[in-house]
C-alpha cells in the first residue's frame, strides 16, 4: 500500500478511505473534522446547515485518528467510527475520509496545509460546532489555521454565548461576515468567518455513550 501507516489501527481501515478525496478545480468544499465517537444526528444537521447556507459542492467528513485535546480512553477504533460515519453521511454531497491517519497527522493546521498543497484551486472552508469555537484558541497554530481558510461555526445548544467571549471571536472580530452573506464565505480571502444560527440539535456523542453505558 502506498500510504504510510500511522499505527496498527490503520490496518483495519478501508484503504480507499485513507486517500485524500477527489475534487474538481473551483469546487467549494467544507472540511468537517470530528472524532465521531459515535456520529449522530447533530453532526448531520451541522453538515447540512453548512452545505446549504454556504452553497458548498461537498462536505468532507474527516474522521480524526484522535483529537489531540481529548482523552482517548473511550475512543472507538478508527475503522469502526469511519464505517458509522459512512452509514450516516452518504449521497453525492458527502465524502468520508480518514486520510489524516495515513499521513500521521494529529493537528488540523497540518490537515489544512496538506490539502492546500495536494488540492490547489479548491475553495476549502473549515466547519465546526459552536463548542469548538469556544476552545479553538487551544488548538495548535490556531491563528495559522484562520489565516489559511475561512471558518463556518454552526450554533449548538449550550455554546451560543461562547461566540461573544471566545478568544477566536475576539481575535477575528473584524473578519466576521453577516449571516445573510454566508454564501460568500468560500470566496473570501482568510481570515474570514461566519456564525450560522438555525435549527439546533442537543445530541452529543457523550450522551449516546452514556446511554449505552460507555460513560465519559
Ligand atoms: N449537536 C451538535 N450541534 C452542533 N455542532 C455539533 C453537535 N455535535 C457535534 N458538533 C460539532 O461536530 C464536530 C465533531 O464533534 P464530535 O465528534 O466531537 O461530537 P460531540 O458530540 O461533540 O462529541 P463528544 O460529546 O464526545 O465531545 C465538532 O465541531 C462539534 O462542535
Ligand atoms: O489541531 C488541533 O490542535 C485540534 C484540537 C482539537 C480538535 N481538533 C480537530 O477538531 C475536530 C473536531 O474534534 P472533536 O473531537 O471535537 O470532534 C477534529 O478534526 C479534530 O482533529 C484539532
Image: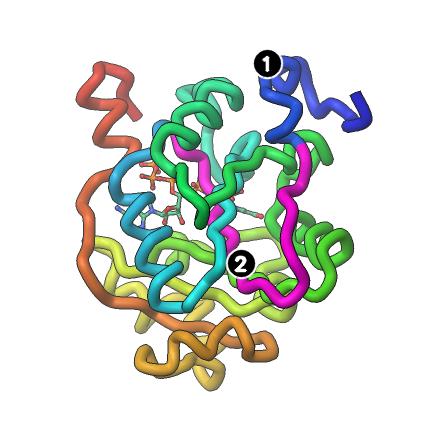
Residue 71 on image: x %, y %: 46, 29
Q: How busy is the neighbourhood of tag 2: few (under 14 within 10 Å), some, or many (20 plus)?
A: many
Left-right relation of 137 to 99: left
In the image, 25 versus 128, the foreground residue is 25
Q: Which residue is mark 1?
A: 12
Q: Is residue 131 visible?
A: no
Determine the secondary structure under disc 1: helix
Q: Residue furthest bottom?
A: 174
In the image, 161 versus 190, the foreground residue is 190
Magenta-drawn stretch contains 7: no
First in sequence: mark 1 vs mark 2: 1
Residue 29 is labelled as 2
Residue 21 on image: x %, y %: 63, 43
Q: Which residues are magenta?
A: 19-37
Left-right relation of 214 to 114: left
Report the magenta stretch's main SS.
loop
Magenta-drawn stretch contains 30: yes
Left-right relation of 125 to 8: left
Residue 163 on image: x %, y %: 32, 68
Classify 21 as above or below 173: above
Classify 47 as above or below 154: above
Amino acid at each position: 500500500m502506498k500510504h504510510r501507516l500511522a499505527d496498527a489501527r490503520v490496518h483495519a481501515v478501508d484503504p480507499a478511505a485513507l486517500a485524500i478525496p477527489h475534487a474538481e478545480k473551483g469546487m467549494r468544499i467544507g472540511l468537517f473534522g470530528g472524532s465521531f465517537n459515535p456520529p449522530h444526528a447533530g453532526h448531520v444537521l451541522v453538515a447540512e446547515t453548512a452545505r446549504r447556507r454556504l452553497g458548498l459542492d461537498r462536505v468532507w467528513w474527516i474522521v480524526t485518528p484522535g483529537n489531540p485535546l481529548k482523552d482517548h480512553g473511550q475512543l472507538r477504533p478508527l475503522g469502526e467510527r469511519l464505517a458509522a460515519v459512512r452509514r450516516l453521511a452518504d449521497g453525492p454531497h458527502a465524502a468520508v475520509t480518514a486520510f489524516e491517519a495515513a499521513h500521521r497527522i494529529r493537528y488540523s493546521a497540518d490537515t489544512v496545509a496538506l490539502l492546500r498543497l495536494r488540492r490547489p484551486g479548491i475553495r476549502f472552508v473549515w466547519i465546526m460546532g459552536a463548542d469548538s469555537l469556544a476552545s479553538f484558541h487551544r488548538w495548535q497554530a490556531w491563528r495559522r489555521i484562520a489565516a489559511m481558510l475561512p471558518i463556518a461555526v454552526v450554533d449548538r445548544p449550550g455554546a451560543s454565548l461562547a461566540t461573544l467571549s471566545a478568544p477566536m471571536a475576539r481575535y477575528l472580530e473584524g473578519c466576521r461576515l453577516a449571516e445573510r452573506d454566508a454564501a460568500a464565505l468560500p470566496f473570501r480571502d482568510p481570515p474570514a468567518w461566519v456564525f450560522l444560527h438555525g435549527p439546533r440539535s442537543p445530541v452529543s456523542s457523550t450522551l449516546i455513550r452514556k446511554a449505552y453505558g460507555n460513560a465519559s
